Structure formats: structure tokens, C-alpha cells
Image: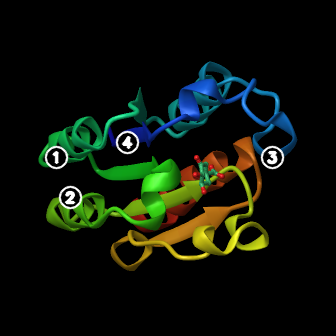
Amino acid sequence: MKKISLIHGPNLNLTGSREPGIYGAETLDAINAAVVQKCEQYGWQCVPFQSNSEGALIDRIHAAIGQCDGLILNAGAYTHYSYALRDAIAATRLPCIEVHLSNVHAREEFRHHSAIAPVCAGVIAGFGKNSYLLAVDALKGILE
Ligand code: DQA
């Protein structure tokens, strides 16, 4: 059975109430439930995790080594400047899909750059909850 680590970074715990015009009205719990359900339909296990702390996110990425087959990561604002997260992803040598709820390229300039994209298999942005569901399909194409 494939195991997927679903990781959300800073402020994403507030999804649903935080700037709903940008990030949507669905809670992170609802998004997690939809991703877990889709993975189960593929016979996969998916374990969600959220932290506002860069170190905790790095520890979680490291924990995937030898335990998981792929990563789905919304690193929030860390996306745009965390070389530490980038190095952690690279260290896993696992396929990682970078996900964003919003279309970061249609927003402020600082969101146009991703420090982690070069070590990810691909990037999905702008589709709200569906960004995560598309990431599951992206991993399916890579892993099966
Ligand atoms: C985000 C986009 C980031 O720029 C922002 O800092 C977030 C959320 C998204 O899902 O659209 O916190 O990753």
C-alpha cells in the first residue's frame, strides 16, 4: 500500500476563515478528509499534518524517508524563501507535489518565486481544494 504524507505549512490551519475570498470557505479538516478519501479510493494511506513552525515541517518531511512513497506539500509563505524546506525535500528523494490553494502567480510579486519548486516533481496552484486532489492524481501518475 502506498503511503502519502500530506503536509500543510503556516497559517493553513486557519483555512476556511482566513481570507476566504482567496483561500476558499472550506476548512483544512474538510480538505484533509477529501484528500484522505481520494487516496483510500486508490488503496493508499494518507496522513495529514499541519504546523506553523519551519522546524516541525522539516522534521515531518524527514519522517517520510523510508516510510512514505510521496509528499503533497503546501508550504504556505515558506514556499517563497525557505531553503531549509527545499533541502529537506531534496533529502527525501521522494516525489513531492507543491500545492497552493490560490493562484500565486496572479498575486503579489513575492509569491511568484518558489524556493522549493526546483526539488518538487511539479506545482499545482489556483484550484482551491482541487489543487490537493489533482496532486493525488499527479502522484498516481508517478508512482503507478
Ligand atoms: C498559499 C500561497 C502562499 O503565498 C501563502 O503564503 C499561503 C497559502 C496557498 O495555498 O495559496 O499561506 O500557499
Quarter of the image containing the N terminus? top left
* Mark 3 → mark 2, Cα distance in angstroms: 28 Å
Q: Is mark 4 within 8 Å of ligand 1?
A: no
Q: Residue at x 26, y 61 (%)?
A: 89
Question: Neighbour class for label 1 at 10 Å: few (<14), some, many (≥20)?
Answer: some
Q: CA distance from mark 1 to mark 3?
A: 30 Å
Please tell me whether mark 3 sits on a helix, a strand or a loop.
helix
- Between the residue at mark 4 and the residue at mark 2, the CA separation in whole angstroms equals 16 Å
Q: Residue at x 79, y 71 (%)?
A: 106
Relative to 80, 21 lies left or right: right
Which residue lies under the disc numbered 3? Answer: 22
Q: Is mark 3 within 8 Å of ligand 1?
A: yes
Q: Which residue is denoted by mark 2 in the rendering?
A: 88
Which amino acid type corresponds to the residue marked 3 in the rendered image? Answer: Ile
Q: CA distance from mark 1 to mark 2?
A: 7 Å
Q: CA distance from mark 4 to mark 3?
A: 26 Å
Nearer the viewer's eye, disc 1 or disc 3? 3
Callout count = 4
Residue type of the residue flagged with mark 1: His
